[in-house]
Image: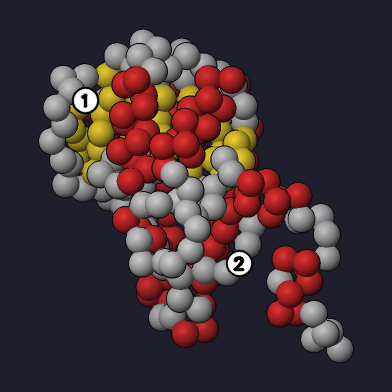
Amino acid sequence: MQIDGSTVLVTGANGGLGGEFVRQALERGAAKVYASARSPREWTDARVVPLVLDVTSEASVRAAVTAAGDVSVVVNNAGVGGSGALLATPVEEVEAVFATNVFGALRVAKAFAPALAANGGGALVDVHSVLSWLALAGGYSASKAALWSITNSLRLELAPQGTLVVGAHLGYTDTPMIAHLDTEKNDPALIVATIWDAVAAGDHEVLADQVSRDVKSALSGPLEALYPALAGRAG
């Protein structure tokens, strides 16, 4: 999948990762980048087209497809946080997280699939998280796990039309969404560069940091290895 000369759409382009996806697509020679958000920011590069897109709105997504029907790469990056314990969080708040992180991403994928097919197949990039595999963040983890499963299904369903579907997993990365967390964080520029490299290589999945690689490798082991708090509680 060539980024050079392609037309890219990035959802959630105002955020830390989203901005990097836009900037690095341009650095890699993208002919045009639709930088979408609910309230798009201004960009100085003429190749960037700000685009209003609320992934939770069917009408907004349909309008975006009409405006950006020439896309060859779609980056499903828009997302919201929500890390409260499930038993302590109102179901409505969990539903709101799923509305963006799961159903919003699926809505974008479904809506843009025909455009990708018409433009040669292209690529769909779904931004997951190491928390797709690690249930430490309540509704957020659950939403990313659901998106991971949806991505696996979309990969099979879109393969016949020649669309590459890339699932990207990453640990804590230095973006405004987790600015409040006092923990070691990845450089978003390095994470996005790794993801774009995977797209260019035609990879189906990218584990963008060591944490993601370690956690995925541990999935076949005992649950107590991932969740030490469970040790000694079997009965």
Where residue 159 appears, x then y in whole percent? Answer: 60, 25
Q: Furthest residue to the bottom?
A: 235
Q: Residue at x 35, y 61 (%)?
A: 179
* Residue at image location 72% in from the left, 66% down from the top: 226
- Residue at 16%, 47% in the rendered image: 39
Can residue 162 be spotted in the picture? yes
Which residue is under mark 1?
Answer: 48
Measure how far apart labels 2 and 1 are at the Cα level.
37 Å
From this view, report whether residue 139 is shown above or below residue 67: below
Residue type of the residue flagged with mark 1: Val
Q: Which of marks 2 and 1 is nearer the N terminus?
A: 1
Bin the neighbour count of mark 1 within 10 Å (Cα to Cα): few under 14, some 14-19, many 20 and up.
many
74 relative to 169 in the view: left or right: left
- Read off the residue under disc 2: 135
SS at badge 2: loop
Side of 86 relative to 37 (left or right): right
